[in-house]
């Protein structure tokens, strides 16, 4: 869906020929060191920012949802207002409510003064309820507790969406990933294996 992407902030390029292809129902983890450009690449995939050069393609009929590293609920009065924004049918709204229930977040709660964990839960309820064709998640588990993470893993497993997830959470990476996209020096390398195979492969590539 992204091809030959270059993007600089100021002088040095963050992305320099990066790419990411997403087929239906794929489970891709996007990994790389802090500041390597993972969030930037996901924003490009979401269409929120534009590259200096390169192409983005999304099947015209495909739906996409993006959960940013820090969901922004300002502009919405209650958690429910935020979560149902962009949901276009009653069934999805019903699902959103039941996700909030299971996440222990009151639908009527004001969006003022939510904790990091509450913002994350609200964001998750919204993107999961939408059941999109492509789901982009930027560090969905920080700062959530283990029970919630396990619940989320099960929900992701049942979802028909293709998923691209950024995470530093080893357990999540091992349970979700069927492919790894490694971002390094502005370029991407792909391994169609589970996360447990990744580190040995990366070390080989680095040598
Ligand atoms: N809007 C921006 N303006 C200027 N520089 C930016 C902007 N967004 C990102 N950067 C820079 O681009 C680089 C990549 O940032 P990005 O947030 O994509 O990295 P990341 O891999 O997601 O890091 P982390 O693992 O810490 O979340 C960093 O050096 C960051 O400072
Ligand atoms: Mg990031």
Image (cartoon, helix red, strand yellow):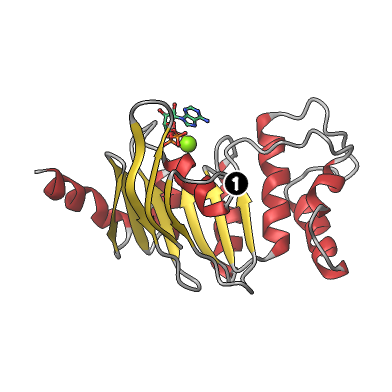
Q: Can I make out residue 46 in this image?
A: yes
Residue at image coords 67%, 38%: 71
| Whole-percent x, y for residue 164 in the image | 48, 56
| Whole-percent x, y for residue 87 in the image | 80, 60
Q: How many marks?
A: 1
Image side of residue 109 versus residue 102, left or right? right
Secondary structure of the residue carrying tag 1 is: loop
Image side of residue 92 versus residue 181, left or right? right
Residue at image coords 60%, 54%: 152
Quadrant the C terminus occupies: top left
Residue linked to disc 1: 48
Q: Nearer the viewer, residue 47 or 177?
A: 47
Image side of residue 194 versus residue 7, left or right? left
Q: Nearer the viewer, residue 173 or 134?
A: 134
User: In this rendering, is residue 200 above or below 191?
Assistant: above
Residue at image coords 75%, 56%: 99
| Whole-percent x, y for residue 190 in the image | 29, 58
Rendering quarter of residue 114 = top right
User: In this rendering, is residue 112 above or below 126?
Assistant: above
| Whole-percent x, y for residue 92 in the image | 80, 65
Q: Residue furthest front?
A: 53
Pointer 1: residues within 10 angstroms few (<14), some, or many (20+)?
few
Q: Can I make out residue 167 in this image?
A: no
Rendering quarter of residue 96 = bottom right
């Amino acid at each position: 869906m992204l091809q030959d992407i270059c993007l600089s902030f100021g002088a040095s390029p963050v992305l320099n020929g990066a790419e990411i292809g997403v087929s239906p129902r794929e489970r891709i983890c996007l990994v790389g060191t802090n500041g390597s450009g993972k969030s930037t690449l996901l924003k490009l995939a979401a269409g929120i920012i534009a590259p200096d050069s390169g192409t983005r393609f999304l099947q015209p009929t495909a739906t996409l949802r993006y959960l940013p590293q820090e969901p922004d609920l300002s502009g919405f009065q209650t958690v429910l207002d935020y979560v149902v924004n962009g949901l276009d049918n009653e069934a999805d709204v019903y699902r959103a409510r039941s996700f909030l229930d299971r996440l222990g977040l009151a639908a009527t709660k004001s969006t003022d003064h939510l904790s990091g964990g509450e913002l994350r839960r609200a964001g998750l309820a919204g993107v999961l309820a939408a059941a999109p064709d492509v789901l982009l998640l930027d560090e969905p588990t920080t700062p959530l507790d283990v029970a919630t993470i396990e619940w989320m893993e099960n929900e992701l497993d049942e979802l028909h969406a293709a998923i691209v997830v950024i995470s530093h959470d080893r357990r999540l990476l091992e349970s979700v990933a069927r492919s790894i996209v490694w971002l390094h020096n502005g370029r991407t390398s792909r391994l169609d294996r589970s996360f447990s195979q990744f580190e040995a492969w990366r070390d080989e590539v680095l040598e």
